[in-house]
Image: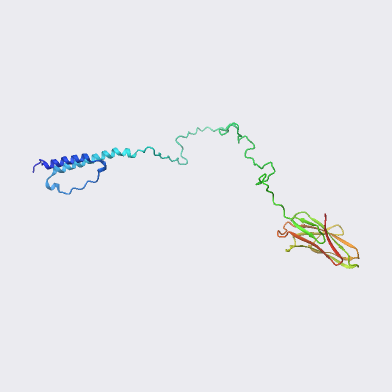
Amino acid sequence: MTNELTEVEERLIRALAARAEQVTPHSLRPAAPPTGNWAARGRAPLVLALAASVASVALVGTAAVSLLTPREQGSVAGTPSPVPEPPAPGTPSPSAPKASGKPVEPSAPGTSPSHLPGTPDPATDKDAGADPGAGTGAGPGTVPGSGSTQAQPREVGLFFQGSNETRTLRPGGATLTFTVTVLNTIGHTVENATDDLSITADGATLGAGDLNVSLLGEDGVWRPISPTARLTTATLAEGESRAHKIRLSLAEGFPATVDRLQVTAFSNGGQETVTPAP
């Protein structure tokens, strides 16, 4: 077996070498496995040449990749650089000055860094943060000049029998005094003439503690009575009259559904009149 190369082999080696010089990074692809049994044919020199060609191609590809890698990894001009993430809580900033251990003395009033000349200093201005309504008589939540007023207390109207006058009372408020007068207009003396009082609510029933009613006795003592009560039973002569003075007030828990009271009197001794005090 001779080691001399034939003309075909020499041409093949030159062609492969020339082809290896033309290989670029874009044309690299996996090499196809050999299809022929070159060892069986005793072509060792040709195998060595092919191996050398493949090695040169690999070197060229490696060099090309190494030249391109820095350029691809570099930042493209005009693209924003990544924003550094803030340090985790509790981690000291590298640029933060170290604590010297010396306590910081408070600055004098009016010398704070945020205080500008000609502007009120919150540290020295006594009126800073004061309630705009303070000192003006405006209560909490009241806007001066808004025209809002507090709700007026509820009033209950009183209407009296035989009188054109009316009065009002407020639950838990003042006391009203009125007089029940009976005049004998029958034309003769009435024995055991009975005078009765009745204070009722229009369309409602009052409880025992809704009204405070009292009658002035002949001894000058006020005694509590029921809203529907008998004032007296006595003889009433012809042409004579008698009067009963009564006080009335509304309890604190007076029903909210009642806004009108009717005050009336009944007597079998003559004509009844109910007159409120001036």
Question: Residue 135 at what x, y percent from top left?
Answer: 69, 41
Question: Residue 65 at what x, y percent from top left?
Answer: 28, 40
Position of 40 relative to 270 (above/below): above
Q: In the current view of this chain or complex, which residue is farthest to the left?
A: 1
Position of residue 195 in the picture relative to residue 98 (left or right): right
Give the quadrant of the C terminus.
bottom right
Q: How many marks?
A: 0
Give the quadrant of the N terminus.
top left
Position of residue 177 in the picture relative to residue 101 (left or right): right
Name the image quarter holding residue 234: bottom right
Question: Residue 134 at what x, y percent from top left?
Answer: 67, 42
Name the image quarter holding residue 259: bottom right
Colour pattern of the rendering: rainbow
Residue shown at 89% from the left, 62% from the top: 241
Position of 185 relative to 28 (above/below): below
Name the image quarter holding residue 125: top right
Question: Residue 113 at what x, y percent from top left?
Answer: 56, 33
Position of residue 101 in the picture relative to residue 272 (left or right): left
